[in-house]
Image (spheres, rainbow, N blue to C red):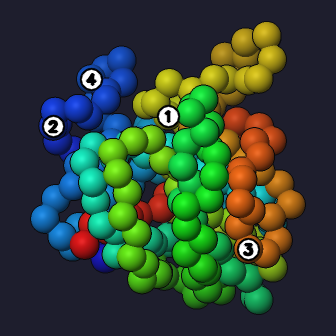
Amino acid sequence: MPLQPVNSFAAGCPTNYADVPICIMPPSGGVYWVGTQTNSNGTSAPAVNEFRLSPVFITSTVLLDRIAGKVTTGAASSTVRLGIYADSGAGVPGSLILDAGTIDGNSVSTQAITISQVLAPGLYWIGGVSQGGTPTVQVTSGNSMLGMPHSFGATYDPTISVNGYNMTGVSGALPATYTVAAVIGTVPRIGLRVA
């Protein structure tokens, strides 16, 4: 089951400085889409209980029926919990929309969870957290095509890649509200399938 990037324009789809689309374009059903687009895809083993989210724009109301991620190197007794958050209104993750459950962190494969989630047009945050171990997962890294702050302070550091946010200490169910710990350059590459 391929996880496919957005590759076409439509009315209302925001673009980055190079006019590259950075949003979900709802197709007729059965196609996977990913969130933030960057210059690099690879693998990484995020720290256990470190919950990473990346942005995705939805341009028209969609019904999602799958959320998926890929484990590339397993870790015994581990899981990767996937979820969707609303934007806070300030360009950072806010309230939990969906704790989709977990994929097996010891099974080297692309895995999907069946969901039934309607999303209206807007900015959302998708991602995952490794729990019980540190499996290596497919990630997106580098700088997001969505304009995001490089830090929460007044000092700019151009060496920091910004692709999403992280929150630490998430060892069970996803929290009702996401608390940003820092900006992050590497986030799980999560796919959403339109029903």
In front: 106, or 99? 99
**Label annotation for residue 19:** 4
Residue at 33 percent across and 45 percent down: it is 121
Q: Nearer the viewer, mark 2 or mark 1?
A: 2
Distance, label 4 to label 3, CA atoms, is 37 Å
Compared to residue 4, the image places residue 116 above or below, namely below
Left or right placement of residue 149 versus residue 54 in this view? right
Distance, label 3 to label 1, CA atoms, is 27 Å
Q: Position of residue 57 (x, y in %)?
A: 38, 42
**Label annotation for residue 144:** 1
Distance, label 2 to label 3, CA atoms, is 36 Å
Chain-order first, disc 2 or disc 1: 2
Compared to residue 13, the image places residue 170 above or below, namely below
Tell me the residue that label 2 is attached to. Answer: 10
Q: Amino acid at mark 4?
A: Asp
Chain-order first, disc 4 or disc 1: 4
Q: Position of residue 81 (x, y in %)?
A: 64, 73
Q: Position of residue 141 (x, y in %)?
A: 55, 44
Distance, label 2 to label 1, CA atoms, is 20 Å
Residue at 39 percent across and 76 percent down: it is 116
Tell me the residue that label 3 is attached to. Answer: 173
Label 3: which secondary element: loop
Q: Amino acid at mark 2?
A: Ala
Label 2: which secondary element: loop
Give neighbour class at mark 4: few <14, some 14-19, many 20+ (Cα, 10 Å). Answer: few
Label 4: which secondary element: loop
Give neighbour class at mark 2: few <14, some 14-19, many 20+ (Cα, 10 Å). Answer: few
Q: Amino acid at mark 3?
A: Ala
Give neighbour class at mark 3: few <14, some 14-19, many 20+ (Cα, 10 Å). Answer: few
Which quadrant is the C terminus positioned in? bottom left
